[in-house]
Amino acid sequence: MTWYERLGVRRVINADARLTRLGGSIMPPEVVEAMAEAARWYVDIDELQRAVGRRLAELTRNEAAYVTSGAAAGLTLATLACVTGPDPVRIARHLALFPATEGFPDEVVIHAAHRIPYDPAVRLAGVRLVSIGTVLKTEPWELEAALTERTAAVLYVAGAHLSRGALPLARVVEIAHASGVPVIVDAAAQLPPVENLWTFTRELGADLAIFSGGKDLGGPQSTGLIVGRADLVEAIHLHGAPNQRLGRPFKVSREEIVGLLAAVERYLRLDHDARRRACEATIAQWIDALRDLPGVRVFRIFPNEAGQPLPRLGVEPDPTRCRLTARELRDRLWDGDPRIAVSLHDDRYISLTAETLEPGEAELVVERLRRLLGDAAAASRA
Ligand SMILES: *Cc1c(COP(=O)(O)O)cnc(C)c1O
């Protein structure tokens, strides 16, 4: 019996996305083995963080890198780094004052189009968010006007799905740097493509970029990766664990630090083209297997919900011809054993992804869908 069985916690087949509430991702064996190995000895955590940071920087073609306890923690630490810089005396003064911030920049500028629910992670660093533009449009002068001596950083949330109302990142970097303000990129879910590990910082000039370790990288769920400028990463070291400063609550274990490194090394070796083709093949098979069902429209969605270049399957029951609504379909998939997690969109259709599935699960998912939708079609004919 597994721990989950003993606890009566049902297994979930994740056809939804790399969601924290479902466990993020499944770590490949080599990551789990690296973690088990790291657990066997004590080490100096700062020495380990710095050694892993150097290796991650080299692998991701960046000046410096740091392992955090998730991308959200990375947002707090990156903001703190931009508020104080790496000077230990300034960091000590800032800590003594906190949550007061006299003498320190205390604003982070963000596009209105980028106000995603991770804002609190930035505000935890004691700053206020200053929104520019609207969700539909932002002008360069709006960014220029928002940059003052109080500005600690500009936070840019990457993703094709968020780009509509925002200035392009390269333009933001140009304007912010002209005022001496660093740019932090929240790229938590922007892998794939793998090149994003260096594109935001090395090509587009952002000062720091933050990725989730527990999404497509397949590292420990409670890790994140910050890459970018060496002086800002040094500031992150000083704010973070094992130091007893503001970043101390975001500690990462030696198992997680080593696990994330193993995950990044593996990720860079993967054949990402083959992965994408495999996802496309599964979506095409799903569409083939479902297209004859009466009262249901099945279709390919691209790009996916996070703006990544990966396809999804859409399944839309026709309410006049199918006994199941999209919401009921989502609920029945979730209520089975194992549970199957999918996304619901506007109560109109559900969508599924393939890249989160383990071997054999794509078949299980399509069988369950066919059974539920086939029963519903039979019921509406009766
Ligand atoms: C997932 C996500 C986060 C949070 O990442 P964690 O690694 O779970 O802390 C932050 N920002 C965006 C855009 C995300 O998609």
Image (cartoon, helix red, strand yellow):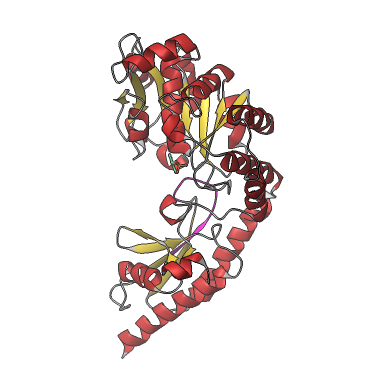
Residue at the image position 34 percent from the left and 31 percent from the top:
137
- The spot of residue 345 in percent (x, y) is 34, 58
Residue 304 visible to an observer of this rendering = yes
246 left or right of 225? left
19 left or right of 319? right
Where is residue 378, by image quadrant? bottom left
Range covered by the magenta-colored residues: 305-314
Residue at the image position 55 percent from the left and 62 percent from the top:
357
- The spot of residue 64 in percent (x, y) is 61, 24
Between 359 and 162, the one lying in front of the other is 359
Of all residues shown, which one is farthest toward the bottom?
A: 382
Residue 61 visible to an observer of this rendering = no
Residue at the image position 54 percent from the left and 39 percent from the top:
253
Quarter occupied by the C terminus: bottom left
Where is residue 172, by image quadrant? top left
Residue at the image position 37 percent from the left and 29 percent from the top:
122
Instruction: Give the number of marks.
Output: 0
- The spot of residue 18 in percent (x, y) is 48, 52
124 left or right of 45? left
Tell me: residue 151, above or below residue 376. Answer: above
- The spot of residue 105 in percent (x, y) is 36, 14
The answer to whether residue 309 is magenta is: yes
> Is most of the magenta stretch helix, strand or loop?
loop
Between 194 and 234, the one lying in front of the other is 234
